[in-house]
Image: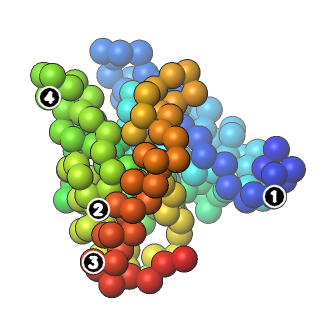
Amino acid sequence: MAKFFGTDYIRLFSFFIPEGDNPDDYRDEVLSRTRAVVALAEEGGITLLHENEKGIYGDSPQRVRDLMASIDSPRYRAIYDAANYVQTGFRPFDESWPVVRDYVDYIHVKDATVPSADHPIGVIKTAGQGAGQYPELLAELHRNGFEGFLSIEPHLGNFDEFGGLCGPDLWTSAYDALTAILNDLDIRYN
């Protein structure tokens, strides 16, 4: 499919863990299954990008690093989603970025508020409007000459079986929020 669509990258997740179970109990099985998928990617010349989605084995920075280091393939890299780190209880730039930065090729841009009693998984926001620490991250990426991808993933509208819908107005607000941070940091983009 990647060849048909003319892309060298496929986003994927590690495996969902039953709620309440210890993810570490599933490590060996996750690594076994992931190695099998990465072997296919290596044969096909495709790079798999693992996203730190909530509820999967690789939802914490430590387990993302474990996956990347254990698989140890240039065809298996990480997506960094600050909002997902916020929603799983980590400070994205202060706690997560130092652990995963060596493996990241792709940045998902969406923000979130810290989970609370009223909002158990937080509230999705535009970049800079939550606890995602985007100004710090983008400044660091710029200082270090990051050459990966930024992708706006707003999820600002209603959710259904296809994910977070937002429409053109909310998508535009997500774009404007990202470009405002880039402009404030004097970072050129296209």
Q: CA distance from mark 4 to mark 3?
A: 30 Å
Visible in this render: residue 113? Answer: yes
Question: Where is residue 118 shown, x and y percent of the image?
Answer: 15, 22
Numbered circle sitting on residue 125: none
Q: Nearer the viewer, mark 4 or mark 3?
A: 3
What's the residue type where badge 3 is placed?
A: Asp
Decide: is 39 above or below 117. below
Dot 4 corresponds to which residue?
Answer: 116
Decide: is 63 above or below 126. above
Dot 1 corresponds to which residue?
Answer: 6
Q: Dot 2, how many residues are within 10 Å of its Cα: few (below 14), some (14-19), or many (20+)?
A: many
Q: Dot 3, how many residues are within 10 Å of its Cα: few (below 14), some (14-19), or many (20+)?
A: few
Q: CA distance from mark 3 to mark 2?
A: 12 Å
Q: Nearer the viewer, residue 5 or 20?
A: 5
Q: Is the C-beta separation of discs 4 and 2 under 8 Å?
A: no
Q: Quadrant of residue 187?
A: bottom left
Apparent side of residue 43 relative to residue 31 in the rendered image (left or right): right
